[in-house]
Amino acid sequence: MGEKRRLSDKKVYAIVVLAIAAISAWGIYQFRHAADLRQELDSQYNRAFYEMVGYVNNVETLLAKSMVSTTTDRTAITLQEAWKQADLAQTNLGQLPVSQPVLASTSKFLNQVGDLSLALDNQNIKGKPLSDEQYGMVEKLYKYSSSLSEKLRELQDDLNAGRLRWGELASKGTRLFSKTKPGEMMKKFETVGDNFKDYPTLIYDGPFSDHMSTAEARGLTGDKISVEKAKEKVREFLGKDRVQEVKDSGKSDNGPIKTYSFQVKLKDMPEDQMINIAVTQKGGHIEWMLSNRPAGESKLDMDKAKKAGTKFLKEKGYENMKDTYYIKQDNTATINYAYTQDDVTIYPDLIKLKIALDTGEITGMEAKTYLSNHTKRDIPEPKISMEEARKKINGKMEVLSSGLAIIPTNYKKEIFCYEFKGKLNDKDFLVYINAETGEEEDILMIIDTPNGVLTM
């Protein structure tokens, strides 16, 4: 009897242990599920916020461009895009877990940017330029958008540093803002809209670097090569004495530039580091190369880095390349180099280099745009003079330098232009005037950041 009772007790004990384990497992699952949901919510809010910041920055840039433009067609295009970007910013603002009263003035501002931009766009399409009063309104909108961008960047810093947590805001909802004493983050959200309390009611990596290229790859020369020949090209490019192993990693037969891909180990490279590289099947040109070697502490300034890039390109057979714009990040500089012919900057023929600022080693190269576009151009004589082109520039802009350039368009054509660099309202711009027709073709705003010089 005693033995049966002991067996019964053991069974009860086992059942209790299993029940506790099951409850614990269920609790862990629920905890993890809740954590996953919070993370998913945070990801959604992060996306909406970051996209909103990007759209607001675009509105600021486009309004600045509209003040520089002197042609009604270009102004119309710019303002139409400002209207779209303001609408997209408004959409993303509405997805954030923040009560309507908190950012109501920001919402109002974005609405009015869109309304005014659309109204002026319709006016410019009909060939009527901005009046002085309308120019003043656009200038006022620009100043407010600049202020909004600055406030949103501060919030973005808090988000990146973990001081702002969307999940908490979402779970507490409007009550967090309306019935409880606001904390520091809530105060910051509210101050975003403070700049617009007295606001009156009213009715966008280097230039052309994202333009992809022609349907045919004009820069590809030579015959089709084998995989083995491509491996030889890799060894020649990286240095035969340095290469330990070239491993085939497949090929791409898509698009106008077909490639072989390889993984490469160098003799002096640590075991966990390698180089990935792609070679064109036609001609054996290097389309891109990327090393995963981390850069150490920066020792080179940008001037030395630019010279290292120019020297590298010359050694690889790329002559007459001129550095244009750059960005610096994590002890590495990414520099754009454009081809020049007869003192004309050929922006479609662009090569990007990644340069480690500890040693000046080239750790990355992207030549797809160059290979797609490069050819010797038949550059005509300008039909208008530099002085005539300069008269097309907005008189309010101070011109600092000028030259000739060929720029790409979204329609895969090239335009021969005068390039003017200038300043308006403490902002730097590039203005392109067609050297044959005198038309204003494009305006880019130069962004001088702590990490580099970019254009939008």
Image: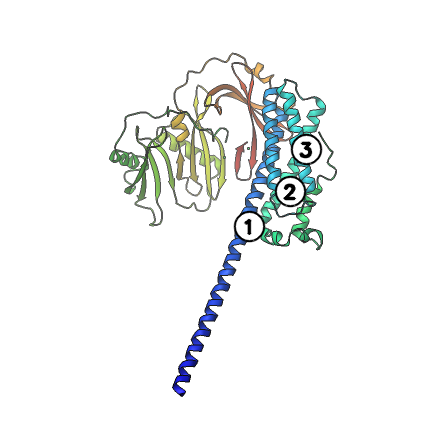
Which label is found at residue 216?
none
Q: Residues within 10 Å of mark 2 (few under 14, many from 20)?
A: some
Question: What amino acid is at disc 1?
Answer: Leu
Q: Please say whether residue 177 is visible from this viewpoint.
A: yes
Q: Earlier in the sequence, mark 1 or mark 3?
A: 1
Q: Is residue 373 left or right of residue 41?
A: left
Which label is found at residue 41?
1
Residue most extreme to the bottom: 1
300, above or below 139, in the image: below
Q: Is residue 385 left or right of residue 202?
A: left
Q: Position of residue 136 (x, y in %)?
A: 70, 27
Q: Position of residue 241 (x, y in %)?
A: 28, 40
Q: Along the line of sight, which residue is nearer the eye, 287 or 330? A: 287
Q: Residues within 10 Å of mark 1 (few under 14, many from 20)?
A: some
Q: Along the line of sight, which residue is nearer the eye, 336 or 34? A: 34
Q: Position of residue 13 (x, y in %)?
A: 44, 77
Q: Is residue 404 left or right of residue 108?
A: left
Q: Along the line of sight, which residue is nearer the eye, 202 or 9? A: 9
Question: What amino acid is at disc 2?
Answer: Lys
Q: Residues within 10 Å of mark 3 (few under 14, many from 20)?
A: some
- Disc 3 marks which residue? 112
Report how far apart the C-alphas of labels 1 and 3 lie in the structure.
30 Å
- Disc 2 marks which residue? 151
Q: Position of residue 177 (x, y in %)?
A: 68, 51
Report how far apart the C-alphas of labels 2 and 1 lie in the structure.
23 Å
Report how far apart the C-alphas of labels 2 and 3 lie in the structure.
19 Å
Residue at the spot 63% in from the left edge and 24% down from the top edge: 121
- The quadrant the N terminus occupies is bottom left
Total marks in image: 3
Residue at the spot 53% in from the left edge and 53% down from the top edge: 37
Mark 1, secondary structure of its residue: helix
Q: Earlier in the sequence, mark 2 or mark 1?
A: 1
